[in-house]
């Protein structure tokens, strides 16, 4: 009888695991807009089929993220200023969107200038592991600082500044947000952060960076996004990674979109003029 009991218990555990996985899959299919779970009905390969306005996720030709391969880049002088940022402190809030955690600036927090156009900073959010690769290497975390410029026709053009991280010493900016991330444990919860200075995000001024034209990495996968990816790899801690992972829903425990085809796009690699 004891032997039968020992055999029966593992079977029950296995059955419970299968039922939980089925329940999670069913919930993904019915209760969320999109998922990062590969192979699920709302996973990355299906995004373009879920809504007509998301068709670009499937049919777009300049999608993101990509692998930034040195053999495919064109080296360009960035001038004396490097990354041309002009950020300033402003009121902000932090929001749990279910698939990520985002900091939204509610007032003018400054801008980044690209070819004479000022893109105003809107927010910042994280993906883990990284969405972009450098020469085939994937990193542990990727930060997106999202900027927008409103065009004369009323539509917005987007520019994203990206910082890549590996595990190591804690990231100072994330350290300031830890208690707030813990406080927004449910999807849709939002907390005021008071005044936050985006300059505290360590992007770098004179470091090397990549630039290319791509898309949003989540639905609706809008194309025409200007991507600027810093070549300086920062660090964050295992504790901070666990905090981010535990804050989101089960369908986004790994919230990185798979790599997309380059399709003969040009990727520029900017260096400060004094190093060019």
Image (spheres, rainbow, N blue to C red):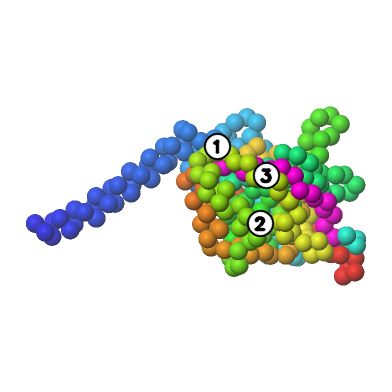
Nearer mark to the viewer, of 3 and 1:
3
- Dot in front, 3 or 2: 3
Q: Where is residue 254 in the image (x, y as percent from the top left)?
A: 53, 52
What is the quadrant of residue 74 in the picture? bottom right
221 and 148: which is toward the camera = 148
204 to the left or right of 173: right
Q: Badge 2, how many Cα within 10 Å: few under 14, some, many 20+?
A: some
Residue 93, given in percent of the width and then of the height, sits at 65, 42
Q: Image quarter for residue 4? A: bottom left
User: How crowded is the residue under tag 3: few (<14 C-alpha within 10 Å), some, or many (20+)?
Assistant: some
- Residue 173 image label: 2
Could you tell which of marks 1 and 2 lies nearer the N-terminus? Answer: 2
Looking at the rendered image, the disc whose residue lies closer to the viewer, 1 or 2, is 2
Asked if residue 195 lies left or right of residue 114, the reply is left
Q: Position of residue 174 (x, y in %)?
A: 62, 56
Mark 3 or mark 2: name the one nearer the start of the chain: 2
The residue shown at (63%, 61%) is 171
- Taking the image as drawn, is residue 61 in sight? no
Q: Is residue 95 above or below residue 209?
A: above
Question: From where the camera sits, is residue 17 visible?
Answer: yes
Label 2: which secondary element = helix
- Mark 1 residue crowding within 10 angstroms, few (<14) / some (14–19) / many (20+): few
The magenta span reads 82-99
Q: Cα distance, mark 3 to mark 2?
A: 14 Å
Quadrant assignment, res 208:
bottom right
Residue, disc 1: 188
Residue 194's disc is: 3
């Amino acid at each position: 009888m004891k032997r039968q009991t020992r055999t029966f218990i593992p079977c029950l555990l296995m059955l419970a695991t299968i039922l939980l996985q089925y329940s999670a899959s069913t919930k993904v299919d019915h209760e969320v807009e999109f998922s990062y779970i590969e192979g699920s009905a709302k996973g990355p390969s299906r995004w373009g089929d879920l809504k007509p306005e998301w068709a670009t996720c499937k049919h777009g030709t300049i999608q993101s993220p990509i692998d930034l391969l040195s053999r495919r880049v064109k080296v360009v002088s960035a001038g004396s200023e490097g990354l041309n940022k002009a950020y300033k402190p402003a009121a902000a809030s932090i929001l749990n969107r279910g698939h990520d955690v985002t900091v939204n600036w509610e007032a003018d927090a400054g801008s980044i200038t690209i070819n004479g156009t000022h893109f105003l900073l809107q927010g910042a959010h994280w993906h883990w592991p990284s969405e972009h690769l450098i020469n085939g290497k994937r990193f542990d975390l990727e930060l997106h600082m999202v900027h927008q410029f409103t065009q004369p026709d009323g539509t917005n053009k987007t520019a994203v500044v990206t910082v890549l991280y590996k595990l190591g010493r804690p990231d100072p900016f994330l350290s300031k947000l830890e208690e707030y991330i813990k406080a927004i444990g449910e999807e849709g919860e939002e907390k005021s952060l008071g005044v936050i200075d985006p300059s505290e995000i360590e992007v770098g001024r004179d470091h090397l960076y990549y630039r290319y034209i791509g898309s949003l990495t989540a639905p609706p996968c809008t194309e025409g996004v200007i991507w600027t990816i810093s070549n300086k790899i920062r660090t964050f801690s295992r504790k901070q990674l666990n905090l981010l992972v535990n804050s989101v829903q089960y369908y986004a425990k790994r919230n990185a979109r798979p790599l997309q085809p380059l399709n003969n796009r040009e990727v520029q690699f900017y260096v400060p003029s004094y190093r060019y």
